[in-house]
Amino acid sequence: MAEHAQPYAVLAEFGTSERLIEAVRRIREQGFTNIDAFTPFPVEGLADALHFRDRKVPVATLLGGIAGGLIGFLMQAGVNLDYPLWIGGRPLIAVPAFIMITFELLVLGAVLAGIGTMFVANRLPRLNHPLFDAEDFRFESDDRFFLAIFADADFDRNEAGKALAALDPRAIIDVPGRPQR
Amino acid sequence: MKERSAEDRVTREVVRIPQHFPARRAWWACFAVALLLLGLFFVSVAVLFGHGPGIWGNNVPVSWGFPISNYVWWVGIGHAGTLISAMLLLLGQQWRNSLNRFAEAMTLFAVVCAGLYPILHLGRPWRFYWMAPYFNTMDVWPQFRSPLTWDFFAVLTYLIVSALFWFIGIIPDLASARDRATKRRWKIFFGLGAMGWRGSARHWHRWQQSYRLTAAIAVPLVVSVHSEISLLFASGPIPGWASTVFPPYFVLGAAFSGFAMVAMLAVWLRAMLGLKDLVTPHHLDMLGKLILATGLMTLYGYLAEAWTAAYAGKEELQTLLDRFSGPYSWSYWSAVLLNFVPLQLMWWGTMRRHPLVLFLVGLSAVIGMWLERYMLLVTSLYRDWLESSVGYFHATFWDWSLFAGTLGVFFTAFLLFIRFLPVISAFEIKEQLEEGRHG
């Protein structure tokens, strides 16, 4: 039954993060590029091994901070010009008094943009994912590190399976594909 | 293989707590008390809405009273959660991993309690949204040159940022709990919270960027929020308040009271939930050191403040003397006593590692800092410089009941948190164990 259905991915399970990183390096050298790794905690160096570089979050944080600060300051200045309150000859655009809210909105803009970008770029929330269909794929583990080769147009299950088996994994797991909608 | 079982134990120990709660009876006893206090909160607020702030002891000249001193106290407690979590993360202090989750939850609930106070203190609390700038038919705007408006933005920003920081930090552990859950209702509950987290390396990469950046921004945010609160006092021309030492003095006092609260919660949770392997004497030791350090800095603030007043002379000096020997001198000397005398026990390692001693020193500091906020507020206000404008502040029953009520708000939320969510950051401890294993 599963023979002719295209799987979603093939997973190889490793016992330590070093072995996973090593496996990622070797599988990339063999030309597999549509791959990802799954770990129970952030692993130093794994993104490098995957040649994954992404600066969306820091850039968004910076831009969000700049936008928040500008909006904060301009809002206060604009409001004071729109409805001038002349009290005791004090300046309308009172920069020292505006600094507090400018800073708070800078922080708010940076954090909302950074975390928002993290969620959007990660395509989260996504409560249902083909990986969750794999019998043995669970996130909670402490010592289980997965390497996944995703099925794409020129995917060959046997070839991928052989390449993974050569890495001496603890187990190889098929992630079943889903019927096309 | 030995380390592997250590990691496995961490997850089991932390993630099992909601589903196989170890101390049901103790939890229910605490929760019952918390619910009673929460009920008292609603009664106090209902009476307040019915009769107005006249039910409290504050009146001209002491127009601030409990609402503002408790507000400052609660925000201060909250700051320690962010500092422990964010500052120690950036400094690479991995022992923080056993404390940050519940310390951040403490921040969140303390800020909620704090935020309620200025709103309830408004004569017409239902119009609190007038603090927000929005287009309205009256064509008026908030006064952005007033510290009250700064306050609104500071607390709102702080609440949003600490909630998000706490949430993205808990997502991976919710995913662990989801995958360990056996009952359907737990699977759904944790599954929704985990948002489909599956530990992809790409996800982790972006997650780490946003977690660290948020931490880096949260530290100056704490400083700015509490400095801003001190400006509520310091930007007015009131003797005893108009002092440039106030922002750092307030921030350090806040950290001091907050670390004391974290220490108390750590001792309590450790005993109640049996977390002795995760919150070790080493953690208590570090907390004791933090309390000692911030406590001594606060002591320096006291000295600097007294020096400034003595140097300024006139009304400033008079206010200082009122604090030393006026009708509210009891609050000054109790604050000094409770803040700085038991604190000296923290010089000894055996005392810091002793849970009960640490708890009592923390309790003493928390009460002492509460008295300090009360003292700072009342002693500067009660004595104006005309004989006719001298008036004393006495807290009424409703002052106390609302304060006890906010404790109910805090503990109800906190108890629900420890009952239903992972109280300790399991994945960060696993990461730390892994790094320890490979040097």
Image (spheres, coloured by chain):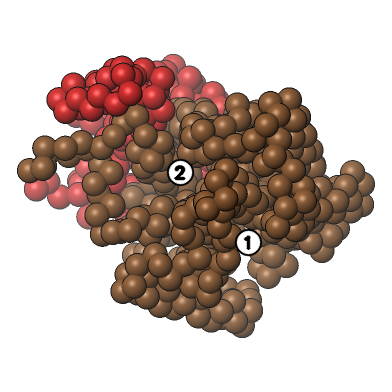
Give the spatial CA distance, label 2 vs label 1. Answer: 26 Å
Residue A64, placed above or below residue B166: above
Residue B50, placed above or below residue B321: below
Tag 2 and tag 1, C-beta contact below 8 Å: no
Q: Are marks 2 and 1 on the same chain?
A: yes
Q: Classify residue A45 by image quadrant.
A: top right
Front residue (pair B176, B343): B343
The earlier-in-sequence mark between 2 and 1 is 1
The residue depicted at 33 percent of the width and 58 percent of the height is B123
Q: Classify residue A133 by image quadrant.
A: bottom left
Left or right: residue B227 compared with residue B269: left
Left or right: residue A55 compared with residue B319: left
The residue depicted at 39 percent of the width and 24 percent of the height is A97
Front residue (pair B232, B250): B232
Residue at disc 2, secondary structure: helix
Residue A136 makes an appearance in the image: no
What amino acid type should be assigned to the residue bearing mark 2? Ser
The residue depicted at 60 percent of the width and 81 percent of the height is B29
Residue that label 2 marks: B162
Front residue (pair B18, B135): B135
Residue that label 1 marks: B13
Give percent across and percent down for residue B278: 70, 54
What amino acid type should be assigned to the residue bearing mark 1? Glu
Residue B273 makes an appearance in the image: yes
Quadrant location of the C terminus of chain B in the rendered image? top right
Residue mark closest to the camera, 2 vs 1: 2
Give percent across and percent down for residue A163: 43, 29
Label 1 is found on which chain of the structure? Answer: B
Q: Colour of chain A?
A: red
Total labels drawn? 2
Q: Colour of chain B?
A: brown
